[in-house]
Amino acid sequence: MAALSSTLRGLALLTLCLVSLSAGVQAFSQSDTASGDSVQSNPRVLILGGGVAGIIAARTLHQNGLENFLIIEARDEIGGRLRSHTFGNGTTIELGANWVQGTQVGHGPSNPIWDLARKHNVSTVFNDYSSITTYDGAGLVNYTNIVDDATDNLDKITELAGERVTSNLIDLNARAGYSLVGAKPQSSHAKAAEYWNFDWEYGDTPSGSSLIAAGLNNNFTFDTDQGGFSDENRLSIDQRGFKTIITEEANGFLRPSQLLLNSTVKRIKYSHSGVQVTLANGTSITGDYVLCTFSLGVLQNDDVIFDPVLPDWKMEAIQSMTMTTYTKIFLQFPHKFWFNTEMGLYADDERGRYPVWQSLDHPKFLDGSGILFATVTGQYSERIEALPDRQVQSEVMDILRSMFPDTNVPSPSDFFFPRWHSDPLYRGSYSNWPASFTREHHDNLRASVGVGGRERLWFAGEATSFKYFGFLHGAYTEAVSVTQEMIRCIRRGQCTGLGHFDEVRNVRPYDTIWIRGARRR
């Protein structure tokens, strides 16, 4: 997931919550619903969030003849974590999702994000990760052989993950997986190489990641033998912004009356008779159904209040998954002084300290732009978000001067990085699956919430995708799947929704005796 991808793995990317509301301020009764009146034939659907999940969910409603919907978006434009920024010279850079990850081989399965990019003529270029130059604190040092070994180790732990699935063995974290295949990096070079292959993809450390889920997630997108799309990654260089895949798609069906911008949701009140959504400005909006594209991070931080509170099984699932952060730090210089490859890797004594570098001033990308960017993830992203820009810039420049000790490194003419973790609209970049997060937890994360037999709340997005969590195409596929299930519920009047487990239990109980009041002396 070498993007926010994507975050979306990927900026870039949102969790979809469907809530049923009655049209206007009128609630509907059991008899009304069962009789198939206008509440069922022309329900009002509120879609909370205008990212990939929200727009594709709206399109799914449109394609099924349900036009009475309203998208409520907190920002002044749609796109969610597909966000761009314009530097002083007019060059557009991507702050969030930047890559189409996995495209298509022959007539095999096609990544739906790749389909959108081709449909709307979004400029993308193959990003060759093997085009790399390596550095450490002494400057240019060739340790690409260690990078290749780390790539092989990732293949080994992916294979190990598959063996554990087929043998029905318990999950481990990816750090344990690495150790089991004999990969125990000690040198700064080996740690940077591991980071390049793992952290840069998942936005989290091997210790914080599920071995099995990481392996499956990789295969389902990149391995055609496992139903994946392809191993190709294509970087968006479209100066309209990568969000064009969504803005142009929305232009094909969305009417102005179906979109409400600059409107932040603060409360969702739900009951047997409907739902009321309250905005930050105090406005209340009601309808028949709501589709929310809140990120997992927003749900974890209680930025939106549910009334009544969500069930325990839902809250446990929300809090058990990880929302990680993937931060790109952009610098623009008056002239290019760095590597001619597409990528650079820096090995610091501190693992994760400004390790991955990419040149946008490259003949394949934005030639002559003078733009270079570094990537940090996870806790290091959280660290730099707490610092003033000038300190982060100073640290980055120190790294560059270490990488190029014989070069007069100029001061940047422009500098920018997003703060995804602290932004209350996102609270991170994309989700990651920790080893303690079970498949039952994931089913509960995805499950709808009902009241008195009425399924009022539905959840979908990249975080709820078993196969594609963290990817843009996870948000897309979940939006389609969950919205179709919601439509079936609407047309039937009542349904069981997406099921859940009231409690997630161990297969075997703990063999432990607890002694109340005992004190160790």
Image: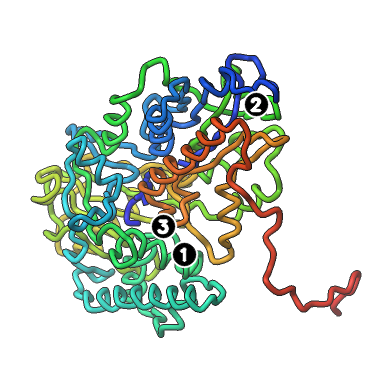
Residue 195, image x, y percentages: 36, 67
Instruction: Name the residue located 63 percent from the left edge and 22 percent from the top edge.
Output: 35
Quarter assignment of residue 26: top right
**Residue marked by disc 1:** 213
Residue 101, image x, y percentages: 28, 53
**Disc 1, SS:** helix
Above or below, 168 relative to 219: below
Q: CA distance from mark 2 to mark 3?
A: 47 Å
Which badge, 3 or 1, comes first in the chain's sequence? 3
Give the amino acid type for the residue marked by disc 3 in the picture: Gly
Which badge, 1 or 2, comes first in the chain's sequence? 2
Instruction: Name the residue located 29 percent from the left edge and 31 percent from the top edge.
Output: 249
**Residue marked by disc 2:** 34
Residue 435, image x, y percentages: 54, 66
Above or below, 324 relative to 348: above
Residue 94, image x, y percentages: 28, 42
Q: Is residue 300 at least partly visible in the picture?
A: no
**Residue marked by disc 3:** 203
